[in-house]
Amino acid sequence: MPDAPGLELIAQEINDSHPGAVTETALEHGRATLVVNPGKVTDVLRWLRDTEEQRYTFMSSLHAADYLPATPRFAVHYELISRERMERLNVKALVADPAAGNGAGGELPEIDSCVELYPTADFQEREAYDMFGIRFRGHPDLRRILMPEDYEGWPQRRDFPVGGEEVLFTHNEIDTPRWFE
Amino acid sequence: MAGDALRDEQYDRLLTERGMRAEVEDPMAALVRAGAEIEQGPPDVEGDLEPEQELMTINMGPHHPATHGVLRLIVTLRGEQVLDLKPVVGYVHTGIEKNCETKSYWKVIPYVERMDYLAYFFNMEAFCGCVERLLEIEIPERAKYLRVIHMELNRLHSHLVWLGTSCIDLGAISMFWYCFRERDAVLDLFEMSSGQRMHTRYFQVGGVAEDIPVGFERKLREFIELMPSRLDQYEALLDRNEIFLRRTKDVGIVSRERLLELGVTGPLLRAAGEPWDLRKADSYLAYGDFDFKIPVGTVGDNYDRYRVRLAEMRESVRIIEQALDGLPTGPWIADERKVVLPPREELATSMEALIHHFKLVTEGFRVPPGELYYSIEGPRGELGCFVVADGSAKPARVHVRDPSFANLQAFRDMAVGGYVADLITSLAMLDPILGGIDR
């Protein structure tokens, strides 16, 4: 991972070419984090991937997290590796929940997809969409991946109850015939 | 002879005149054309198919032994050739990540173990290591070495299951029995150190649950002395086996660049010639102390994948040997009373120990707010764990980056253009564990 001055330098260089892209940097537990503006996340990722002295060409993981009750509520984490220098960098895009003010209305948080930059993000963005309902703009095939396709709700959100799902067995056939359909 | 030719000619003319000649093609010409089609090789996937060429879409799995779990493949075929492939996952999704949010940290460990059920020590290490870094506690040297020993044994175990089941897919049942014989020896060792054969819950936050028992070292030494000769036997069975070679060589090639784009790690990536191993790159735990090599392939076909895994097993044996030789004495778990359970014998004499024990068992320890992604080299590639701590005794988010999940994306590239039978081989060599993919 880059050290503290190195991280500041990266943040500054990104902000020079894309003003307002990096809002914050953090360095804790040996993990360097760039907190970026969600609207510019693909610009930042492209810069980190293509700039000659950075070359964060490998994305090891993409995952989302729900920081309820904090605002902005969601974050998408991009774990990047520069394999030449064995440096890890975490890019964190904080995404606000558009449905926060008006109850549980259908609007979903949105962020740009990075599948074009890192094809590995395909499944992982689908998982983040499936679990948190974060819509990735420009994803080629944004469907649920782990939950059934007709499932309703975003199960990994913090306000989604555990055990809200009724477990069905074959003996339920008497009460709820054709439950499996 | 001349009369015969004349008669043939007359007969021929007669047939033509009466319109009785069937439009029969010269059989040799048809053969030659078929040969040329085979020479052309696999069809162009993106290419323009004639409308009358019939495509068949079949559903492989989810319940099929050759899919190594509950994996469903929607395969588009033209004859025997795979034109398109779409993996469908989620059939064994059990919401482990969600459940982890309702358990205290030390109760999460058995949950994460059950994700990738052939790499339970790795799952434990990813989670425990992540929490240890969030707590900023250092684990004792002996615990590091014991963890390395168990993880490398687990790598052997995982690769043995992979080798046995892959060979079944190629029609070789005896390899399965041989591999499972050695796997059983590994499981015996796990049972000895932790009391369980699988899902041992041996690693704790702060170290390992218990020191290795008397006799473990002797039994482990017997095993690592035996193992290289067993590996020689496997190689003798497979390396000059014509069926095996024909089925694996030059099958399922994906270029190194493409694999890197797709986020593939582990033996699959190394088989394509990229020496990328987190044990070397990160040298977490005590891996910096050991002398071992990273086996790499050249072509990146299924044969290289097999060779790389087998060579990796040899390196694992070497690591275990070195770890056993250099095993430090001392405590096996950190002396952190707020995190680690007090020693059993203190409970009868020390009030303080009893209070700590009570607090840890009922509530669990608290982790200061923070978040961390920590990754290790699992048997299938980069196994990462992402934990968000909110200051309470339960994690706010646990996410495991499972290598099988990312690696499965490369399967389309491996299988498309080849034959159905090779699809099964490629899937076996990909070595996906559906418990890890679906979590």
Image (cartoon, coloured by chain):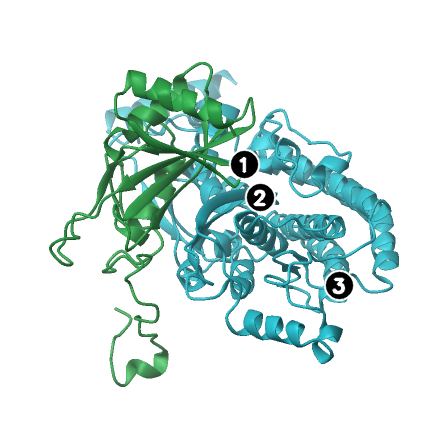
Position of B320 compared to A29: left or right?
right
The Cα atoms of the two marked residues, 2 and 3, are separated by: 24 Å
Q: Quadrant of residue A13?
A: top left
Local packing at callout 3 (Cα closer than 10 Å; few below 14, some 14-19, many 20+) is many
Q: Which mark is residue B193?
A: 3
Q: Which residue is mark 2?
A: B380
User: Which chain wears cyan?
Assistant: B
> How far is the residue under mark 1 from the one under mark 2?
7 Å
Q: Is disc 1 in contact with disc 2, using a CB cutoff of under 8 Å?
A: yes
Q: Residues within 10 Å of mark 2 (few under 14, many from 20)?
A: many
Q: Earlier in the sequence, mark 3 or mark 1?
A: 3
Residue type highlighted by circle 1: Thr
Residue A45 in the image: state x and y as whole percent.
Answer: 35, 27
Query: SS of the residue at dot 3?
Result: helix
Tell me: residue A4, above or below residue B5. below
What residue is pinned by disc 1? B265
Please report, as a chain letter, where disc 1 is located: B
Q: Earlier in the sequence, mark 1 or mark 2?
A: 1
Q: Is residue B111 left or right of residue B194?
A: left
Q: Colour of chain A?
A: green
